Amino acid sequence: MALLLLGLLGLLGLLALLRACTRGPRPAPRWPPGPRPLPLIGNLHLLRVSQQDQSLMELSERFGPVFTVHLGWQKTVVLSGYEAVKEALVGTGQQLAGRPPIAIFQLIQGGGGIFFSSGARWKAARQFTVRTLHGLGVGRGPVADKVLQELRCLMGQLDHYGGRPFPLALLGWAPSNITFALLFGQRFDYRDPVFVSLLRLIGEVMVLLGAPGLQLFNIYPRLGALLQLHRPVLRKIEELRAVLMTLLEARRPLAPGGGPVHCYVDALLQQGQGGDPDGLFAQTNVVACVLDMVMAGTETTSATLQWAALLMGKHPSVQDRVQEELDRVLGPGRPPRPEDQRSLPYTTAVLHEVQRFITLLPHMPRCTVSDTRLHGYLLPKGTPVVPLLSSVLLDKTQWETPHQFNPGHFLDASGCFVKRAAFLPFSAGRRVCVGESLARTELFLLFAGLLQRFRLLPPPGLSPAGLDTTPRPAFTMRPPAQVLCAVPRHQGH
């Protein structure tokens, strides 16, 4: 019996050896060109901390649209320009759907959530989120009604100022509250301590995530841990997580298995109660998904609406044309609806140009999930790949005046709205933003509603040219803190 077993094992070993020989050696990687790295720091000396995407675009002029940089010891492939980014994000299918292990997000999320996870956990969380948002009415009438309700609350706040200067950040309250209502099944009063705490913590975390010290931590995690560079953001994350846990526990009795789903958290809690044999929706991943949705769902739309208002104050002639179109199509009293976009081509073009011009999230790294051929190069599994979205939105081969705020980029000679293939603020491919439909609805209704009601002006003593449009350092390209005036246009409405 023992001899038979040894013989069988020997035969299996021989078969494995023959299979390995017939497969042949694994092909050697073929890396794109790039600058010569220095010991320890790689190419970090070539990248400006506050303008990393601009530095990478400058390197692409020397090394081409696909090149390699060394971030410390890590080889990273960078894609610059519309053609290179489109081919990678759309043409590679699942091969570029991974996310590299970013040190700070590994600590915060432990590989869970939606935006910084990979593999089975990411697929399950993404499919669940897309399905749940659709079930809650995103992209349809129910959510539009919620947005218009929040618009009325926001306009009430602006009315209290009576045309006097208000803080630009106030405009972020409405889109944040819309996200909270979808997540937790309730909107908050703007003075509610929970609402105030959430906005404060989200803002502080976003600023800390964009700090130079944290970028250093992500490149040299051991050194960063020794210097405690990650501690400030982790403390804020724990505060934020404690608030979210309170809101989660408040929903738990209201979300029994099989009961009606009134919000994203209800659906998450039900998913974790049954039909989850692999534990993909255990408590830790539920919290990770909620944290991702809170951070991304508030920050992007909130910052974009603030930018839109600031740019209207900066470009009064553009604001004139938007308000003329709104008055002609909607009049002073009827609120906008999503379907009005077809009748408001200039307003729609302006909102698209705001998103193109600000490049809110310049890049978000991907990762090859297998050996991948890209633009003639062979990248090994696990290679970080950075598609520079800013290089697409500022690509001089795609936009007539890429560095100017020009709504004409989205209009034809007849003044009709034109879709542009290089408009990719929400990315593309398998990792396209899960909240794109919600963000588009929110931005259009809030922007059109605000300009229908108010004239946005610089504060007294400041000209439009004096408004500051230099992005504030943060994880996203936030507008700088300042004030505007919202002067009512139609008294009595």
Image (cartoon, grey):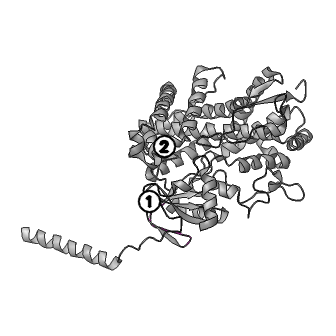
Helix, strand or loop status at disc 1: loop
Residue at image x 46%, y 44%? 217
Query: Is residue 300 toward the left or the right of residue 128 in the image?
Result: right
Residue at image x 55%, y 44%? 129
Disc nearest the viewer among 2 and 1: 1
The residue carrying mark 1 is: 382
Q: In the image, which residues are magenta?
A: 368-375
Disc 1 crowd rating (10 Å Cα; few below 14, some 14-19, many 20+) is: some
Examine the rendered structure and indicate whether residue 311 appears above or below residue 390.
above
Give the residue type that dot 1 points to: Gly
Helix, strand or loop status at disc 2: loop
Question: Does any portion of residue 255 appear in the rendered image?
Answer: no
Give the residue type that dot 2 points to: Gly
Per the rendering, the mark at residue 341 is none
Residue 417 coordinates in the image, percent (x, y)? 82, 54
364 and 55: which one is in front? 55
Q: Earlier in the sequence, mark 2 or mark 1?
A: 2
Residue at image x 60%, y 42%? 133
Query: Is residue 239 toward the left or the right of residue 49 in the image?
Result: left
Residue 389 coordinates in the image, percent (x, y)? 63, 55
Question: Does any portion of residue 378 appear in the rendered image?
Answer: yes
244 and 263: which one is in front? 244
Main SS type for the magenta part?
loop
Residue at image x 86%, y 55%? 416
In magenta segment, residue 370: yes
